[in-house]
Amino acid sequence: MFLKSVRLLVTYISYVKVELIDAYYYFNYSTLKVRKKNNENLSAQIIAHVHSIERAFSLKNTRDTFGIELVDSLNKLISQIDDESKYEYELKIFNSAIKEYNNYHNIHNNYDSRISPYKDYKHKKSCLKSLYKDIVRGRHSVRDFSNKSISDLSVLKSIAMAKNTAPSVCNRQGWEVVLVKNKEKIENVLNLQSGNSGIENIQNIIVVSSDLTSFFGLNERNQPYIDGGIFLMSLLNSLHYNNIASCTLNWTVDRKQDSKLKKLLNIKNSKVVIALVALGSYDEDAIKIASSYRKPLKSILKIVE
Ligand SMILES: Cc1cc2nc3c(=O)[nH]c(=O)nc-3n(C[C@H](O)[C@H](O)[C@H](O)COP(=O)(O)O)c2cc1C
């Protein structure tokens, strides 16, 4: 009994130690403590600001007054660029967003861009013969759902397809999906989440979570997020394949907010919520989607020969 308690205490202390080391790295490299000297977070901050502008253009009803403070702080970020050659991608998407923003607000345009922060999207129905390439490249976050009802069967098929295809550590499949169909509950869930403003006609919400009971030892402490994230991606593609439009909604909240969601949906404390997914139907007409331009390959790839 005594030995067992000592072992437990040692494990607990080891856990606190590794968490403190994690916290050290997060504190040093995330925006919690921007390392001014290198300004390494500038790119991520610019991209997130630009995305908020392109996101606004992808809504059914873009607010007339959107973006005033956002553009102000985006300009401040851009003014911190000391070497433009290192920020070609960021400047490209910035110019496109500001050009469109100025057009929208009838502001004289000094900006020129050959790309646009939004694209027209017309859903091409997927079927058995659809090519993999068309499914994965045709999936986009949709924030302009139509009011046509989605098929319950297609939602269930998508969840089944995701669980049958997503890989996980030792095939442990430590994930859970909560499908929220009740209108009032959907409203309550959306009120707890911060990234759904302007999205209408959400018919279902899926809460993707990982179950901590599936993970072993100290070194798997981040595995719930990895397996849960892989499942999420698999689900998004499966939904698209089954002609269900979706938009992932972040669940980056504090414990208090997390507890409110868990209480509302009766989710156990052993679950780690990875993200929410808003489901709706594709419009038959063309809609606008955020362009979400990706970085060039060379900026994310390092080859070791
Ligand atoms: C974990 C995660 C959280 C997200 N949260 C939100 C959100 O709260 N609101 C939103 O409108 N979009 C959200 N998105 C959608 C992203 O903005 C979108 O995936 C990204 O711009 C790439 O575009 P795509 O999904 O069309 O390829 C989220 C995406 C992920 C993966």
Image (cartoon, rainbow, N blue to C red):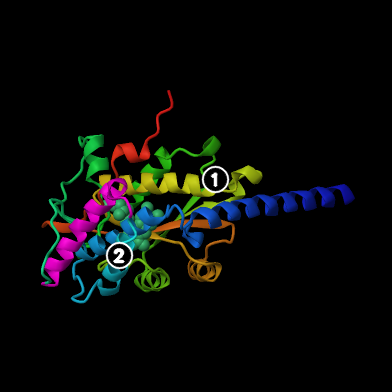
| Three-letter code, disc 2 | Leu
Q: Residue at x 78, y 49 (%)?
A: 10
Q: How crowded is mark 2: few (under 14 residues within 10 Å), some or many (20 or more)?
A: some
Q: Which region of the structure is painted magenta?
A: 82-106
Residue 227 percent location from the top left of the image: 49, 44
Residue 228 image offset from top left, x and y in percent = 47, 48
Number of marks drawn: 2
User: Which SS class for mark 1?
Assistant: helix
Query: In the rendered view, would you say 291 is above or below 191?
Result: above
Q: In which quarter of the image is residue 161?
A: top left
Q: How far apart are marks 1 and 2 (CA)?
A: 34 Å
Q: In which quarter of the image is the C terminus?
A: top left
Judge whether residue 291 is colored magenta.
no
Can residue 152 be spotted in the picture? no
Q: Name the disc covering residue 74, or none.
A: 2
Whether the magenta-drawn stretch holds residue 88 is answered as: yes
- In the displayed image of the protein, which residue is found farthest to the right? 2
- Per the image, label 2 sits on a secondary structure element best described as helix
Three-letter residue code for mark 1: Gln
Residue 83 is left or right of residue 232, and the answer is left
* Label 1: few (<14), some (14–19) or many (≥20) C-alpha neighbours in 10 Å: some
Residue at 13% across, 63% down: 110
Residue at numbered disc 1? 223
| Relative horizontal placement of residue 218, taking residue 103 as reference (left or right) | right
